[in-house]
Amino acid sequence: MEKIPILRMGQFLLVTIQVDLYDRLALNLESDLVQMVNKTGARGVLIDISAVSIVDSFMGRILGNIASMSKILDAETVVVGMQPAVAITLVELGLPLKGVYTALNVEKGMELLRSRIGPDHEELDDDDDGGIE
Amino acid sequence: MTNDTLKSLQKRKKQILENWMQYQLADASLREDLMSNDELRLQSEELVDTILNTLNESNITQPDSMDFDPVFEILGGISISRARQGFTPRETAIYVFSLKDAIQDALQDELANDLPQLLDATLKVNKLIDSFGVVTFETFIKGREEVIFRQTSEIEEISTPVIRVWEGILALPIIGTLDSSRTQVVMENLLQEIVDTSSSIAILDISGVPAVDSLVAQHLIKTVSATRLMGAECIISGIRPEIAQTIVHLGIDLSNIITKATLASALKYAFALQQVEVRKIQKERKFL
């Protein structure tokens, strides 16, 4: 059974989707990701969809779901590298993905995540001994 | 119309051509600036030649017959070139229908003593030239439509330039009415350019858009949403007071879109987002 790897990078989780998402795979990703967020206590989730060329309303909803679920678990979600055609399709489908942060590429997405959760993290750092950054 | 008559018509070819040229030149609306008289004569001679050569007793009543294909070909060529040169439909119509008068004159001379024959021949020639007229017009309009189509696509191409104003800042001035197909082109160009230059801010300048109705606003909102999905911020600038009034009167909600009055203020805002500062250089006065 195909599985989409979820990589841990410090306090962020990195998911790179490199195959076309079919419904089952997307649902598995959703539950795996939420489990991972819970297990690792990640503060941010970065989803790279630069290789995804086909998108439907279900996929749009899954992305929205992941963002809302992560938010409840206190993690921000950034979707990066969306193709123009995918963006146009999502808009035409009436799914502007409210509540999901977006960035042009992984680098900018990381920057965004850092700036989003940066201040909180530093405060925590004062209590903990040594931070990741 | 008998073969004899046709033969005599062929003999009178010179006369028909002369008459035809006279009829054409007599028309006040003749455009000598678009086509010289010599050129016109050559064109006309070729057509008269072809018509008289293909005409025979049996096919004169059947304008659809294959025999006339060369005639239609010449007519088509003439009317398409006339459409491109900018002749009016009236001029093209006079061109074809004055041939009828010319042939008529020849027939009258030939069959002056045989009225039933003259009537028969006249009716047939009338019908034939009418069908030539129809064909000419079909091709004339087709030629015109081609011209219009080409212009439309040209306008579409030149009307959506994406300008890179600064590192990471794109500007897209929109000029003319925004309809669905144009929005599509604008959106695609903009998003592709965002990917290519990895810009994080796009400024959509609508100072050249004459009016904004709810549909245009819908298109703008779509473009902004798509840009956001890509991970870039979109600013709408160049909103004139009248447009602001219509937007509010129509009850369009632009509250979650960044709007600026001028391109300059949008650029300023973009600089602030990028943490870029533009300032005047204080010239140090050095006395050498």
Image (tube, coloured by chain):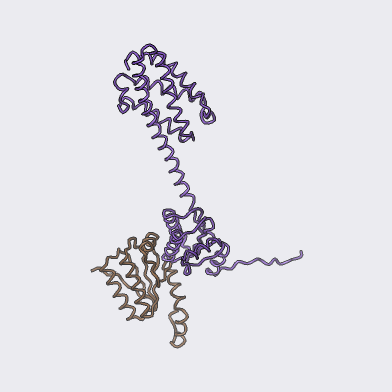
Chain colours: A brown, B purple
Q: Can you see residue A10?
A: no
Give the residue furthest to the bottom. Answer: A127
Quarter assignment of residue A81: bottom left
Residue B107 or residue B53, whichever sits in front: B107
Q: Going by the image, does A121 lie left or right of B55?
A: right
Q: In the depicted view, which residue is nearer to us: A127 or B151?
A: B151
Q: Residue at x 29, y 75 (%)?
A: A32
- Percent coordinates x, y for residue B8 in the rendering: 37, 13
Q: Residue at x 43, y 32 (%)?
A: B79
Q: Which residue lies most toward the top here?
A: B113
In the rendered structure, the answer to whether residue A7 lies left or right of residue B187 reads left
Looking at the rendered image, the quarter that the N terminus of chain B falls into is top left
Image quadrant where residue B118 sits: top left
Residue B11 in view, yes or no: yes
Q: Is residue B160 left or right of residue A61?
A: right
- Quadrant location of the C terminus of chain B in the rendered image: bottom right
Residue furthest to the right in view is: B287
How many labels were placed on the picture? 0
In-front residue for pair B27/A81: B27
Vertical position of residue B259 compared to residue A11: above or below: above
Residue A29 percent coordinates (x, y): 29, 72
Q: In the figure, residue B95 lies in which quadrant? A: top left
Q: Residue A84, percent across and down?
A: 40, 60
